[in-house]
Image: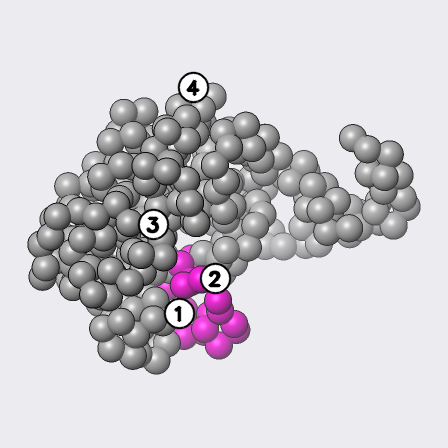
Amino acid sequence: MCLKNLEFLRNSRFLRKIAKIRYNHSKKDKNVKRTKMSISVLMYHHVLENDGTIAISQKNFEAQMKMLAKGGYTTITPDELLAYKQGKITLPKKSVLITFDDGWRNNYIYAYPILKKYGLKATIFLITSWIEEASKQPLAFEPACHEKAKILAKERPGAVVLNWDEVEAMSDVFSFHSHTHGHTDGYFGKLDLADDIGLCKQTIKKRLGFDDVHLCWPRGIYDENSIKIAKDAGYKVLYTTKRGANLSDNECEHIKRIAIKNSTFWLKKTLFIYCNDTLSRLYSLIKSK
């Protein structure tokens, strides 16, 4: 650790911050069982042949999944995260939730076999109108980079977006939850937020047969009014793009996630920090300086 960080750790203001955090944490819902363990939620988008914008290569993705499997990590589902947050269950140490956003077809072609190979679970947050349109248009898979995939998602969704048959085929490894109906992009009709959320929930119910309570915000953009609309629609757990740890504290409206980098060493180091309550808080304070 550099001298600057050592001085910072010795600084009395820093110690007061730690004391305040511990005090505020102790004041939260007394009915929730506390634990010093925190849950890391990993955020992926594309798995492709090469690294790129919000894309990880097959090679690097497999290296990361191998590290999780061999390193004793347990992959959990969103429902298990909710139960843990509510203090209803305990989870193994080194538990992580792997998430993918949007519903890209490369998740089926490249990520699914690797996850299955290592016996890991993951979740995809689906943009339901994209899945609906892709299911009407069976096409050969195109391994497009993110910029091209966004164009094809509107023009030829069947080439780059999952269809419902593929969703069903992946259900032994993946669980599926909500990422709104249109992702605010308006590719297949412009919607206000209430309709965007409501239609997504209805489609999940119709296609997958359950009332979803997990919603991931498109691009991580939301405000207090957005939260109210989501809760009014029946969502309980709201996923952000904010980095951090998730404690057993009954706070489910701001689930933090860690945007993935391509380095396995980076992931190992990051999980070591964020799977521990105290370390994650210290690290967050140091990074904020």
| 13 shown above or below 121 | below
Please identify, in this view, whether the residue under mark 3 or under mark 1 is nearer the observer: 3
Residue placed under numbered mark 2 in the picture: 220
Q: Badge 3 local density, few (<14 within 10 Å), some, or many (20+)?
A: some
Query: Rounded to the nearest whole Å, what is the CA distance between mark 3 and mark 2?
Result: 21 Å
Work out whether mark 3 precedes mark 1 in sequence or the reverse, and give the earlier one.
3
Q: Which residues are magenta?
A: 216-238
Residue placed under numbered mark 1 in the picture: 230
91 horizontally vs 138: left or right: right
Residue 53 at x, y percent in the picture: 43, 49
Whether 98 is among the magenta residues is no
Residue placed under numbered mark 4 in the picture: 70
Asked which secondary structure carries label 4, the reply is helix
Query: Rounded to the nearest whole Å, what is the CA distance between mark 1 and mark 4?
Result: 38 Å
Between 235 and 123, the one lying in front of the other is 123
Please identify, in this view, whether the residue under mark 3 or under mark 2 is nearer the observer: 3
Work out whether mark 2 precedes mark 1 in sequence or the reverse, and give the earlier one.
2
Q: Name the residue located 24 percent from the left edge and 66 percent from the top edge.
A: 154
Query: Rounded to the nearest whole Å, what is the CA distance between mark 3 and mark 1?
Result: 31 Å
Q: Name the residue located 17 percent from the left edge and 47 percent from the top edge.
A: 141
254 horizontally vs 1: left or right: left
Whether 237 is among the magenta residues is yes
Q: Is residue 81 visible?
A: no
Residue placed under numbered mark 3 in the picture: 145
Work out whether mark 4 precedes mark 2 in sequence or the reverse, and give the earlier one.
4
96 horizontally vs 266: left or right: left
Amino acid under label 4? Lys
Q: Name the residue located 15 percent from the left edge and 41 percent from the top edge.
A: 169
Q: Are marks 3 and 4 in contact (CB under 8 Å)?
A: no
Q: Quadrant of residue 107?
A: top left
